[in-house]
Amino acid sequence: MSSVAGNGRRGEAGQVLIGLVGGLLAVVLGVFVLGAVAQGVGRQGAAQRASDLGALAGARAMHELYPRLFEPAVIEGRVNPAHLEKEAYLAAGRAAAERVAAANGGAGARIAFPDGDTFAPVRVRVEVRDRVEVGGRGLTLRAVAEAELGPGGGATGFARGGGYTGPLAMRQGKGMRPDVAQAFDRMNAAARAAGVSLLVNSAFRSDAEQAILFARNPDPKWVAPPGQSLHRYATELDLGPASAYGWLAANARRFGFVQRYSWEPWHYGYLLNARSSPRSGPGGERASGVPGFVPERFAPMLSRAAQRWNVSATLLAAQLYAESGFNPFAVSSAGAQGIAQFMPGTARAYGLADPFDAVEAIDAQAHLMRDLLRRFADVSLALAAYNAGPAPVAACGCVPPYPETRGYVARILGLMGGAGELVGTGGGLAVRLVR
């Protein structure tokens, strides 16, 4: 028995030794696998960084060139060097995305434009792939990023207690309607170029704030009683300094602002859709105020609708271009119909019996846009509501983060700018990473 017991102890020792060796091998193998996994995670992060930076670079290149898409190809019979064809525009975005992705370890990145079939693409996608060995197996890492040009930010506050209830954009610490803010930005840029600095001394004021001012100085010539001040509508700006008054008097109307009172050289108000009335002018616009890119047969319809509903003819024309390409019989995959792409429910709500009747559809389009502009007081928000519906726009006070909607708004704003229209864009076009 003693010999059997001894053999058993030697067997147990052998098993312990095998267990220790196996444990050490497992630890070594685990360290190896963990190292490989960590390496894979690191490589995945590097690939994602390369795709992110590549997408942003491509979008920035497109942002710089975007206005040139809307320059006329020919001016007075001569080729316009400022015009850029869509193919060259996309090639520049692709080259920038590839170059920056490669510089960050993403050589051979795949570049695509998800909305490339539109007349003015605004999105770029970059895909970077890499191979890594984990546990003796080769795995493919894939990192994808998308960036876009879209309506910029604008609203940073919300107005209540006056004649306007809605989002406010802040300029120099003062709140104003987003479209007013963007018109002011353009005017301020022109003033700076002329050596003039504009200061915003006052903008939106609630009735309660106006009551305090009136109590301090109860002279209605200089301070309106509460409930009567135009500042309650978030369209009015008190501007300075006094040295800027001459420049403002000569130039403010170009940007949609008028001096409200002859005795207040600092008080300027913004006129919504100030350029919607018929006019003649440069930039290919006809006497009716309808841009030159509109087919002749639709120009009278647009002019009448714009005047009836006090909506910019250029805005309506740019929408029709984006919606249907001026095709009265267009039908979308979602069921939108006609030249203005009305959904059946919206058509009924606006008394549009036949969406394929171009005259009636354009009139209903102008009616709807008039209502949306009144509700959201900003061109980009009204366009977003036309495309995505009012509810998501009202929920965030912004252009919702839907790729189709952001692209729709950006294309129309670009087309309007190319036609010479002053547009309140809520921040212009901004570059953002969306994926």
Image (cartoon, rainbow, N blue to C red):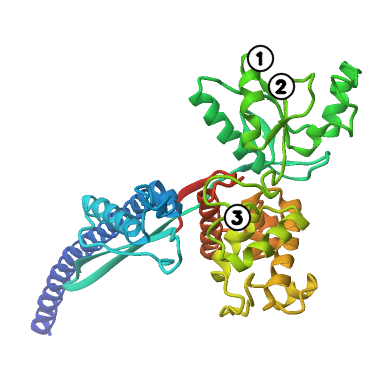
Amino acid at dot 1:
Ala
Residue at disc 2, secondary structure: loop
Q: Is residue 367 left or right of residue 116?
A: right
Give me the residue at 56% from left, 43% from top. 427
Label 1: which residue?
242
Residue at disc 1, secondary structure: helix
Amino acid at dot 3:
Val
Residue 225 in sight from this viewpoint: yes
- Residue 28 lies in what quarter of the image? bottom left
Q: Position of residue 191 (x, y in %)?
A: 55, 26
Distance Cα–Cα, label 2 vs label 1:
8 Å
Label 3: which residue?
399
Are dots 2 and 1 in contact, CB under 8 Å? yes
**Between residues 286 and 250, which one lies in front from this camera angle?**
286
Distance Cα–Cα, label 3 vs label 2:
33 Å
Residue 392 in sight from this viewpoint: no
Q: Position of residue 19 (x, y in %)?
A: 17, 72
